Amino acid sequence: MRSSGCSATDAEEIEANQFAAAILMPADLVIGEARRLLKDPSATDASIVPLLAQGFDVSDQAMEYRHGPVSVAGPSTLVWTLGDVEADVVADVELTGATVVVGALDPMAELVLIQRTAVARAEARGLDPDHPRHLTRSVVLS
């Protein structure tokens, strides 16, 4: 994190963060360890992030930020890309067994398709997408 007295530009900070993450959490090693952890029948996608963070000696938040999408992807996951995505990122997600839809339309148009797909899947499972379970309104506008 940048301190308030730092004079680095946003581009410099982004580059520094990416460099540090590549050293602390190399993608190939994290993915390999995630696959190993997921072989345990009791493991869940969510339960391995803290284990990965501990194994690489980084915070849970750092692991989630750097490798969150890959660490939660699995055979029952649908990952839908928006905009330009590097081929190696798509390949990494595919290696998890997730279904990957590479969006070819403008991202705003893709969002409409994603929303319609989510609503159809929820309704097919007997869920009400307008009233998600375990959620309550936290902000009431009048």
Image (cartoon, rainbow, N blue to C red):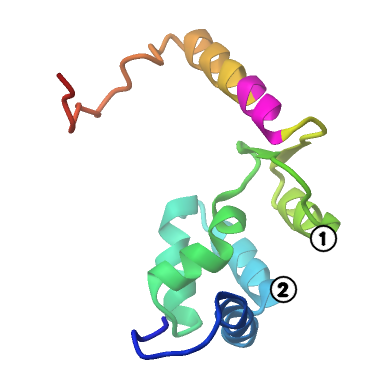
Q: Distance between the residues labelled 2 and 1?
A: 11 Å
Residue that numbered label 1 is attached to: 88
First-in-chain label (2 vs 1):
2
Q: Where in the figure is residue 45, as x and y percent of width and height?
A: 49, 52
The residue under the point 66% across, 21% down is: 113
Q: Which amino acid does label 1 sit on?
A: Asp
- Which quadrant of the figure has residue 23? bottom right
Main secondary structure found in the magenta portion:
helix
Instruction: Give the quarter of the figure containing the C terminus.
Output: top left
Instruction: Give the quarter of the figure containing the N terminus.
Output: bottom left
Give the magenta part as a residue range. Answer: 107-113
Residue that numbered label 2 is attached to: 28
Is 126 part of what is drawn in magenta?
A: no
Q: Where in the figure is residue 15, as x and y percent of width and height?
A: 64, 80
Q: In this view, does 78 lie above or below 12?
A: above
> What secondary structure is marked by label 2?
helix
